[in-house]
Amino acid sequence: MAKILLVEDNEMNRDMLSRRLIRKGYEVVIAVDGGQGVAMAKSEKPDLILMDMSLPVIDGWEATRQVKAAEETKAIPVIALTAHAMSGDREKALEAGCNDYDTKPIELPRLLSKIETLLGGKAASGTGTAAA
């Protein structure tokens, strides 16, 4: 089963997205700020990271740069999630090291398609579990 690290400070967004991903068969681990996200990328070794860009402690841009700079986490695909869909944000996310970019509110079918593409066949299994 593929493990996804969800780095999201908004409790409502976090709960909604993690429940939907678990129902799709993914294992979901959660970080609530950028610093915790970087640490959990190293400790949890997720298959993919969903990174909110507006985070406390370290923002998503810097957290992604740190994940991509570390030898043990640089290969983990990162999808930037942002409500601030402004011109240039996609380019900024890609420059920070994100592999893809999606806007909020999340459209689950679109996001799942991006997740499945980046996981390259390491898809979800039948049942999911959550860890906080």
Image (cartoon, rainbow, N blue to C red):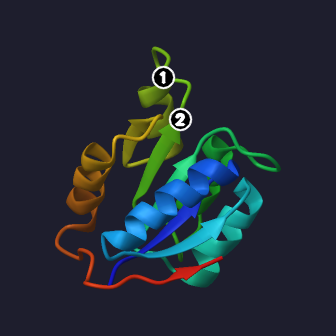
> Taking 112 as reference, is 105 left or right?
right
Q: How far across and how far down the image is residue 118, in percent? A: 27, 59
Numbered mark located on residue 82 in the image: 2
**Can residue 75 be seen here?**
no
> Taking 123 as reference, is 40 left or right?
right
**Residue in view at x 61 percent, y 40 percent:** 53
Task: Give above or below for 12 relative to 44.
Answer: above
**Residue in view at x 34 percent, y 40 percent:** 107
Q: How far across and how far down the image is residue 26, in percent? A: 37, 75
Task: Give above or below for 11 relative to 84.
Answer: below
**Quadrant where the N terminus lies?**
bottom left
Amino acid under label 1? Ala
Secondary structure beneath disc 2? strand
Give the quarter of the image for residue 59.
top right
**Can residue 113 be seen here?**
yes
User: Badge 1 is on which residue?
Assistant: 85
